[in-house]
Amino acid sequence: MRNLLQLILRYSNFLLLVGLEVVAFILVIRGNKYQQIAASGAANAVTGSVQLVVNNIASYFRLRADNEQLLEENARLNAEIFELLNDQTRQRHDNDTATTRQRTPLASEESPYICADLDYSFVPARVIAFSDDRHHNYITLNKGRRDGIAPDQGVIGKDGIVGVVQSVSTHFAVVAPVIHEGLFISSMIQKNDYMATLHWHVPDIHTASLEDVARHVDVQIGDTIVTSGMSAIFPANMPVGVVSDVSLGEGDSYYDIDVRLATDFNSLRTVHILRYAHRAELDSIQ
């Protein structure tokens, strides 16, 4: 306290000058309209700048919550899109079945590519680790068993399929991506529904091979490859990639086909995990 009093006494003249300046400034502003307007504008400018900085800081700390909200919204929209597509598929199937029955009353066999009830829900997740430098690459997600995640669930990104859940803990899941040498994806050529198998070979993380396509099949560069829907992992017609190269040896029975993958794994940050509602029932009878 004594030191504070000594400091005030030492700078008393300066403090008195500052005090008089402040009083004079207040009197000038109060007594003159122009100075009032100028002072008010300056105060508003300072206040606005401070508020802008505060808002920017607050917005930065709200980014994670905003992003989570966007992921949830994307999941809801994806579910609605699949519901609409499923309704359209059922409608076309019902029309085709009705026409077939008119021609052949005994015909009642359903198309193998039509899933009568997709019942997929979408769980948004973030990529927290990713390897792309080995034969058995992996992706780690920030969702786990407590979020309803289980092995053998499909994972998709904004552009196409990503991979399949391999293992889970309480809070995390490890995914075998399409660029995993041990993963085989049931796929088909979209234009003719010809089923084949997608398999990745090192080292290009952007390209995989489409196998088991016989030489009589019409396949061209630029053809779209999608999932076949022949499992509970992925529904049919999920984007897989586009044919980038086709070759056939003189004595070969099957094509060598390269597929440019739809998903860019280098820029993958968020995904959706697919949960099939009837998975337990399906597994129990297979």
Image (cartoon, rainbow, N blue to C red):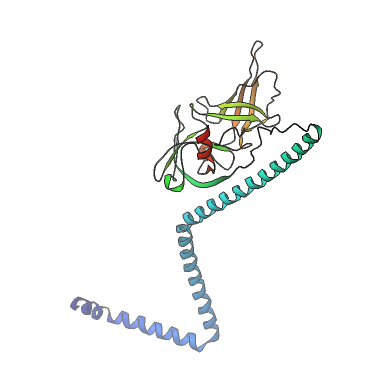
Q: Quadrant of the N terminus?
A: bottom left
Nearer to us in this view, 207 or 12: 207
**Residue 264 shows in this picture:** no
Q: Residue at x 68, y 45 (%)?
A: 87
Residue 187: image x %, image y %?
Answer: 61, 30
Furthest-top residue in view?
251
Q: Nearer the viewer, residue 26 or 122?
A: 122
Residue closer to the observer: 84 or 258: 84
Viewer-proximal residue among 239 and 59: 239
Give x and y (percent) for residue 171. Answer: 40, 46
Whether residue 203 sits left or right of residue 87 in the image: it is left
Q: Position of residue 224 (x, y in %)?
A: 66, 32
| Relative vertical location of residue 60 with respect to residue 220 in this rendering, above or below | below
Q: From this viewpoint, which residue is outermost toward the bottom?
A: 31
Where is residue 48 drawn, in percent x and y? 51, 70
Residue at the extreme front of the image, as rendered: 106
Residue drawn where x is 34% and y is 82% of the image: 17
Total numbered labels:
0
Residue under the point 59% across and 38% down? 160
Q: Is residue 203 left or right of residue 249?
A: left
Residue 160's place in the image compared with 84, above or below, is: above
- Residue at 69% x, 22% y is 217
